[in-house]
Image: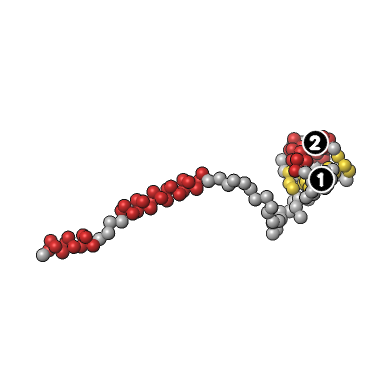
Amino acid sequence: MRRRRGRAQEEDEVNLTPMLDVVFIMLIFFIVTASFVKEAGIDVSRPPAAQPKEQKERGNIIVMITSNNQVWMDGRPVDVRALRPNVERMHAENPQGSVIIQADQESENGLLVAVMDAARQAGVENVSLAGD
């Protein structure tokens, strides 16, 4: 009788090892797949930050782009080609300052990129865009 009782106990137990193997394989698969998933695009229309990061007043260089694509700097209109020397001059006067670009919503993106490139080429590492 003892033998029958031992076999009955063995049959009642469920072997979980194969199920755990499958779960771990699926976990590894999902982790590996998630690391290769890339976003197709970026979310462009983001709301403004609740508490925007404030720039310290260090004599920042402010460049404005109007809705009709005019670039203004230091209270006067500036040609995009002359922007780099002007930024270099103002940055030499105050090396701790950064460039803050205030672009109108209606301005062209290409002009904004050109202004950012001119500021970077002038040696300014900290270029920021001003928001509302």
Residue 43 horizontal/vertical position (percent): 65, 50
Q: Is residue 37 visible?
A: yes
Q: Earlier in the sequence, mark 1 or mark 2?
A: 1
Placement of 63 over or under 122, stated as above or below: below
Placement of 54 over or under 63, stated as above or below: below
Residue 60 horizontal/vertical position (percent): 79, 46
Q: Is residue 126 left or right of residue 70?
A: left
Measured Cα–Cα span from mark 1 to mark 2: 15 Å
Residue at horizontal 12%, vertical 63%? 2
Quarter of the figure with residue 63: top right
Q: Is residue 73 visible?
A: no
Residue receiving disc 2: 84
Placement of 20 over or under 123, stated as above or below: below
In what quadrant of the picture does the N terminus appear? bottom left
Q: Is residue 8 left or right of residue 108?
A: left
Residue at horizontal 81%, vertical 45%? 65
Residue 22 horizontal/vertical position (percent): 36, 51
Residue 10 horizontal/vertical position (percent): 21, 60
Circle 2: residue type: Arg
Residue at horizontal 75%, vertical 52%? 131
Of 77 and 38, the residue lying toward us: 38
Q: Is residue 44 left or right of residue 30?
A: right
Of 91 and 77, the residue lying toward us: 77
In what quadrant of the picture does the C terminus appear? bottom right
Question: What's the mark number on residue 30?
Answer: none
Placement of 118 over or under 31, stated as above or below: above
Question: What's the mark number on residue 65?
Answer: 1
Of 108 and 57, the residue lying toward us: 108
Under circle 1, the secondary element is strand
Name the outermost residue toward the left: 1
Residue at horizontal 25%, vertical 60%? 13
Under circle 2, the secondary element is helix
